[in-house]
Amino acid sequence: MSMPGNVLPEKVRSVHLIAICGTAMGALACMLKEMGYTVTGSDLHVYPPMSDFLRAKDIHIFEGFHADHLASRPDLVVVGNAVSRENPEAKAMQAMGLFYCSMPQAINRFAAADKRQIVITGTHGKTTTSSFIAWMLHCAKMDPSFLIGGILSDFNSNYRVGRGKWIVLEGDEYDTAYFDKGAKFFHYTPDVAIVTSIEFDHADIFKDLDAVKQTFRKFMQALPDKVDLVAFDDDENIAELLPAVSARVVGYGKHPDTEWTLGEVRVAPPFTYFRVFHHGQPYGNYRTRMIGLHNLSNLLAGVAVAHCLNIDGQAVAHALESFKGVRRRQEVRGIKNDIVVIDDFAHHPTAVRETIQAVKSFYGSRRLVAVFEPRTNSSRRDVFQSVYPACFDAADEICVRQAPLLEKIPEGQRFSSSRLVADLCASGKKAFFFEDTDAIIKHLCLHAAPGDVLLIMSNGGFDNIHARLLEAL
């Protein structure tokens, strides 16, 4: 593994991580600690739960960024994606001639060393698909390692250092570091790869959909013919890229001639029952606590992977039935006065639409109130302004918060929450605009009724709205 103008040392004993409190960076730090390395880190915002999590692992964290934090001259410095070349520690690292690398390079070098890799990519569904596959390998007693972008409820963690030969990695198309603007998944060497979907996202780094497709094209075309590429069959952008792929393509999805397809689906809370077909022939009858067709597609990809790995059918069935899912993915945070409060990470228009439809289909006749905070670099821009209104069709009422941190977006490119609400109202929907989270909580406390389902969607903390709302109800 090498860097532009830099070659990593053969022997590493101590590692320092700049911006250690990110979800993936924190997980990497813990993995390195469990593997026997001396680990330190620094970050601008050091606060719970990640600060407590790292300190419980006896990892020393420096508050803020300063050249003095590298005084011990660590053998290797791992630079987080959010770190700029003007960061004091990044400048000191260069001036001192220290060895350095990006997070995915460190994962490939240390966590994935001598492991066979299952890499899950795609605009949507990466975290749930990765989490289910990791759980399935665990149920099959394969003792997997994994590093995933969400907290797995079954493990209460987003990483694991296993002794088995497989590691599950969530492959991100976002850029790697200030010195490497290529996608993070370019650094992995999968034995099995999954592509769940390809859509425009990350408007801060991709100019348009063609730029996104070019990144996935490079990843997919680099896969050798011995690799199994598990690809969703109902995505025209994936289909466009497949003809030039050398890897063995394993299709899954909706079309009758696809290798893996879903059969009859029946919802009977708390389970969803479904059938799986392989080459058009019945393969298995299963049940899961996951809801919605998009989640069943994610699980179907996992079943296809199980077949590639020759995993026992009983282990697959047990994994499907027992899988608890991922924190912040349709997670029920609490129920008060028969009002259900659900937390979800959805922010991209497709994810918002699919999540609302899934929750509505599961809770049947209950009134569904969708609460949305546009917070990502893409959703705070106007690139999806005209797309979002149709995504809320399945909701009975919609509450939209003013997008936070709009000052970081160029003035002519900012998303308008009030315009979204106006468009929703014009289409006949019951929708409300709110300047802040306090106003949303007040509104919901006044108008929510027993039987309602409150679906709260944001990729951020949303001012701790879930706990505050449950207390206020």
Image: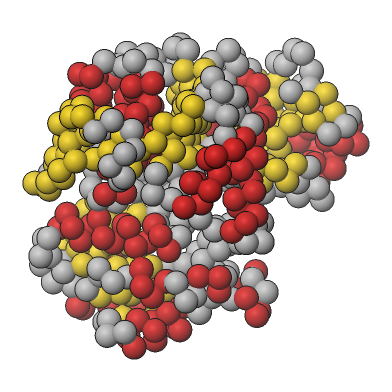
Q: Quadrant of the N terminus?
A: top right
Pick the residue in front: 229 or 186: 229
Q: Quadrant of the C terminus?
A: bottom left
Query: x%, y% of residue 113?
Result: 60, 16
Residue at the (25%, 75%) spot, across then down: 397
Query: x%, y% of residue 435?
Result: 44, 79
Answer with the quarter of the image where residue 425 lies.
Answer: bottom left
Query: x%, y% of residue 34?
Result: 53, 18
Above or below 166: residue 359: below
Do we see residue 308 in this rendering? yes
Please say which color scheme the image uses: secondary structure
Residue at the (41%, 31%) spot, across then down: 250
Residue at the (67%, 74%) spot, across then down: 410
Query: x%, y% of residue 279?
Result: 28, 30
Answer with the quarter of the image where residue 79 lies.
Answer: top right
Do we see residue 204 in this rendering? no
| Residue 306 as seen in the image, left or right of residue 76 | left
State the count of labels: 0
Above or below 445: residue 224: above
Residue at the (82%, 50%) spot, across then down: 86
Answer with the quarter of the image where residue 300 lies.
Answer: top left
Pick the residue in front: 393 or 459: 393
